[in-house]
Amino acid sequence: MMNKNSYSYLLSHHRLLWRISINELRGRYAGALLGKAWIVLAPLLILGVYAIIYTLIFEVRPTDIGRLQYVLHLFAGMIPFLMMNESLANGVVSVVSNKAVLNNTVFPIDLAPPKAVLMAQGTIVAGFISIFTIEAITFTVPWTFIFFPVIWGLSLLALSGLAWILSMLNVVFRDLKDLISVIMMMLFIASPIAYTPSMVPDSLKFLLLLNPFAYYVSAFQAVTVHGRLPGVFHILFLFVFSFGLFFLGSWVFSRSKRVLIDYV
């Protein structure tokens, strides 16, 4: 059993993973005044604040798109960031916080990091439904929106692989969560969320190329707001990086968990 790759547990225990994630989400909002409505309201409130800050206070005015499209561009970048930030923040501590199931054969510890990623998806579901609704009302839904599930699926693969790796490192380096928070803020600034790539000076555009997070943000924005597909290199990078990180994370986790009991 110990030699089984971690990703194989997703195939054999996917129904259990889904059921436990749903139950934990219900428990998270139990007793709250608005209950599960916070899954929708929380990201929308955050997005609304950012929209006001950048459009009314900072008065950001991209020259290549209109105001409404810019707000949707901002939303389509912020939503993945919120989702990825929550996924990694919870994923990095998923093993330590679930040490009670280390030797559990019903719910393998291998499922803890992907569960953290799965439970962060309420943000992206609520956010992009909102974007689609606005575009439907204004008759601006791009045909490329049909590729949104592909980009979303690739991001889930990458996040699951990264969560596997980070959760292992956090077993030894318990302050990793704080470091991840700082890194995510740096990646937020270095990603075309509140600005478009055309607004970046040529001398700084290499930062976008070096930031893997920016590839996902740009892809989400391209297919859901701007009505275009990412370039060939962009698409190739997303597939190779996502699948590569997923299988690498699975391999690292399945090999490293043998010594978990000595550190957790």
Image (cartoon, rainbow, N blue to C red):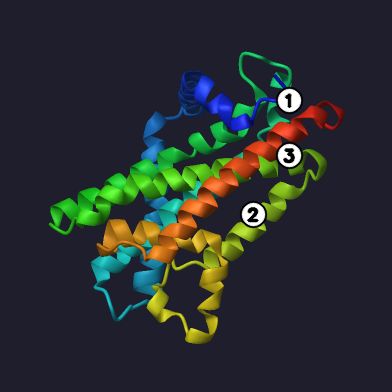
The residue under the point 41% across, 75% down is 197
On the question of residue 89 being in view, the answer is: no
Q: Amino acid at mark 3?
A: Met
Density class for disc 1 (Cα within 10 Å; few <14, some 14-19, many ≥20) is some
Q: Position of residue 34 (x, y in %)?
A: 38, 32
Q: Quadrant of the N terminus?
A: top right
Density class for disc 2 (Cα within 10 Å; few <14, some 14-19, many ≥20) is some
On the question of residue 160 being in view, the answer is: yes
| Mark positioned earlier in the residue sequence (1 or 2) | 1
Q: Amino acid at mark 2?
A: Ser
Nearest-to-viewer mark from 3 and 1: 3
| Mark positioned earlier in the residue sequence (3 or 1) | 1
Q: Amino acid at mark 1?
A: Lys
Task: Identify the secondary structure beneath mark 2.
Answer: helix
Q: Quadrant of the C terminus?
A: top right
Q: Position of residue 212 (x, y in %)?
A: 54, 61
Q: Position of residue 66 (x, y in %)?
A: 24, 73
- In the picture, the disc for residue 111 is none
Marks 3 and 1: CB-CB under 8 Å? Answer: no
Nearest-to-viewer mark from 1 and 2: 1
Of residue 250 and residue 88, the one placed in the foreground of this image is 250
| Mark positioned earlier in the residue sequence (2 or 3) | 3
Which residue in the protein does label 2 denote? 181
Of residue 55 and residue 128, the one placed in the foreground of this image is 128
- Distance from label 3 to label 1 (Cα)? 12 Å
Q: Position of residue 117 (x, y in %)?
A: 53, 38
Which residue in the protein does label 3 denote? 168
Q: Is residue 104 above or below residue 35?
A: above
Task: Identify the secondary structure beneath mark 1.
Answer: helix
Q: Is residue 112 above or below residue 42?
A: above
Density class for disc 3 (Cα within 10 Å; few <14, some 14-19, many ≥20) is many
